[in-house]
Amino acid sequence: MSGAGAGEDLGALELVLVARVARPRGLKGEVACDLLTDFPERFDWVEELIAVFPGGRRERLALEGHWLHGGRVVLKFEGYDTPETAAALAGCELAVPESEAVELGEGEYYDWQLEGCRVETTEGREVGAVREVLHTGGEAPVLVILNDEGRENLVPLAESICVEIDVAARLIRVDAPEGLLEF
């Protein structure tokens, strides 16, 4: 696995969540996990994951095997060989270093890349910062933007409205139709 060497401080790594351990499964220490990635095929080449335990402790886990089952991924980790040892992983979030995120196409973004971005109008007026990205099942996800006074604005993540997205500069420029934004 590239990017996260054994001597690297796990606490300093920016992580991308790929799964959450739901429960032990089977007799050999496997765990059933909810998928938190749009790329389940990533488990074909990942050799280790970083477990983030409730409370924040992080630990590297060597992946011995995996398979998809009923909308979940079942994972088997080295050193977790019984249902009792696997139970210790329940509730953990499983992640990879941000540097190992699957590369997206032009104009595609991960939610975590947009969260925290400053939002301003094309005229330069500050709207706030993206608190979260909602996936409502509509045509486009919705940016939840919170300003300094705690006011929320909901803005569709549509090319016609979000006319510039610069994740490196942490900036989104919007050309919002009249009445969409409240200041």
Image: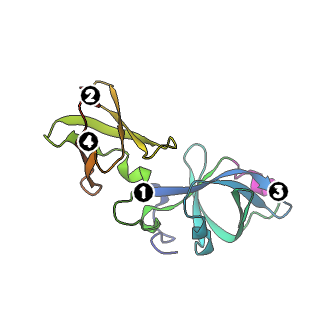
Prevailing secondary structure of the magenta residues: helix
Q: Which residue is mark 1?
A: 12
- Residue drawn at x 27%, y 30% is 181
Q: Which mark is residue 179?
A: 2
- Residue drawn at x 64%, y 69% is 62
Counting other residues with Cα less than 10 Å from the Cα at mark 3, is it few (<14), some (14-19), or many (20 or more)?
some
Q: Which mark is residue 119?
A: 4
| Amino acid of disc 4 | Val
- Residue drawn at x 56%, y 50% is 57
Magenta range? 83-90
Whole-number angstrom distance, CA of label 1 to CA of label 4 = 27 Å
Image vertical order of residue 31 relative to residue 48, above or below = above
Whole-number angstrom distance, CA of label 3 to CA of label 1 = 31 Å
- Residue drawn at x 42%, y 68% is 103
> Is residue 89 part of the magenta span, yes or no?
yes
Earlier-in-chain disc, 2 versus 1: 1
- Front position in the image: 10 or 177: 177
Task: Look at discs 4 and 2 and give the one toward the viewer.
Answer: 2
